[in-house]
Amino acid sequence: MPWITVADSDIGAREEQQDRYLVVCNDDKTNQLLVVADGAGGHTKGALAAQTAITHIRENLTDLWTSEDPQEFLRKLIIQCNQAVLSLGDDDLACTTLVMVFMRSDELFWGHVGDSRLYLIRGGQVVAKTCDHSIGELRKRNDHQLGHQVIGTAENELYMCLGALANISPELDSSAAREGDSVLLCSDGLWGQVDMAKTISELSDTDLSHGSLLKTVQQSISAARTSMPEKSDNITLVVSTYLKAPNIFKRFISAIFK
Amino acid sequence: MGYIRVYRGNDLIKQFELGKEQVTIGRTEDNTLVLAGEGVSRQHAAIEYQDGEYYIVDMGSQNGVFLNSEKVLRSQLKYWDEIQIHNFVIKFMAKQGLSARKDDAKEASGETESDKTKFFKITDEKQLDDLRNKTKECFLSYIDEDGAIKKVLIKKPRVTIGKSKDADIKVSGWFAPGVCATIERQGANYELVPQKRGKASYQNKPISSATKLLDGSTFSVRGRGFQFFNRLTKTS
């Protein structure tokens, strides 16, 4: 696997963990899928929505690994997840955000709805970032009618998520990763409670080993939690760093010198 | 069907569904919607239903009724309209927000959890479509060996130019490597990444490292000229 991946989450100060994440790779470990879902709703409903999306993804992955058009595959998968969350039925709020990234060797394909984010980081700089489906982001873009039409509504309200609308339009993007690049997926419990610039720089300064990365991820989560001790949201962070597999010749040489 | 939310400043103070009967708005208790404030007239305004539409009507108020910041006497309401009366804002929408019962009850009683994610429902799916269907279209144009102008849409994160049979765009030449250069997507941008012996140049200058491609810029790989386009188009 050319990617080193670590993930962790924390319940924060909430009674229930409504964040869910998934890290899964194909049989020969060349491709990987990362998912973060942040559920919202009444008692148990938010967690159920997030879990439903994750379960649907896990059960419908087989064709992703060999897909000719991963972007389109992800789009359909997210739309199916919306149907799955909608079918939870009843009147209680049961919604979830969803951000997922498919790594095919060094090619990245991602899609999202809601305000859980993906960052692509290179040399401590953000190369790409998802744009939240929130009123605040709409307003920042204020070139669109809708931004004006919803003046006065809270910044963190979402206009798109899974489980609210019959039809959704997931936002999709892709990039080519380079040696040392990191992909970071997180729920708003992280990006809303810490200075992301600091988190990104700390991650970029971390040794590229599983143990060191996990330690940094846990420290970031802990920083997010302690920033709001009384009312911290659920926090989830998944980080994956791209390292080219050393070639066979180099392995051979290093084996000799061991 | 219509639904209104009444705000004073940022506080949601009341919300209810509209029926066919007139909703009167004013300072005195005999109104359907009572807005307590010096700047609100006794009978200030009304929301009326007629032939499937709702209208906001000024009932002869002292300080006027504003719809989306414009003074009106009678005006039809559209979803997402905001009616301003003194320091109150009345939002007109298609449906109750999804989270309205729980979160707004908290807002009203002052126990706002500002960090809690809330869901705002856009019921008009056309608006959502409008929002989403603007995407960038990226393509290359070049003249192939037969002198025909080719257009290649860039959909993949990496497009390869080279002699290899797997290359997306073929170039020939005795010493041309399998991959002469790649075009790599980097978030919203694309970069031209030269490879060894690829002889890549951007805007007529040879390059040796990844170079950001701008809309309309030209580059060449192994003597073949390309033009790159990255522009906003409506896809629907």
Image (tube, coloured by chain):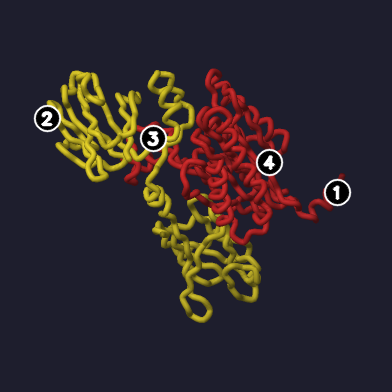
Chain letter for the yellow part: B
Query: Looking at the image, is B154 positioned above or below residue B46?
Result: below
Distance in Å between CA atoms under marks 2 and 4: 66 Å
Label 1: how many Cα within 10 Å (few below 14, some 14–19, many 20+): few
Residue on which disc 1 sits? A255
- Amino acid type shown at disc 2: Gly
Q: At 16% across and 22% down in the image, what residue appears?
A: B42
Residue B191 at x, y = what percent?
Answer: 52, 56
**How many neighbours does mark 2 have within 10 angstroms: few (below 14), some (14-19), or many (20 or more)?**
some
A6 vs B52, left or right, is right
Task: Provide the residue designation for mark 2.
Answer: B60
Chain containing mark 3: B
Q: 10 Å neighbourhood of mark 4: few (<14), some, or many (≥20)?
A: many
Mark 4 element type: strand
> Residue A218's spot in the image, x, y percent?
65, 29
Q: Which residue is mark 3?
A: B96
Earlier-in-chain disc, 1 versus 4: 4
Q: Residue furthest front?
A: B21
Query: Chain ID for label 4?
Result: A
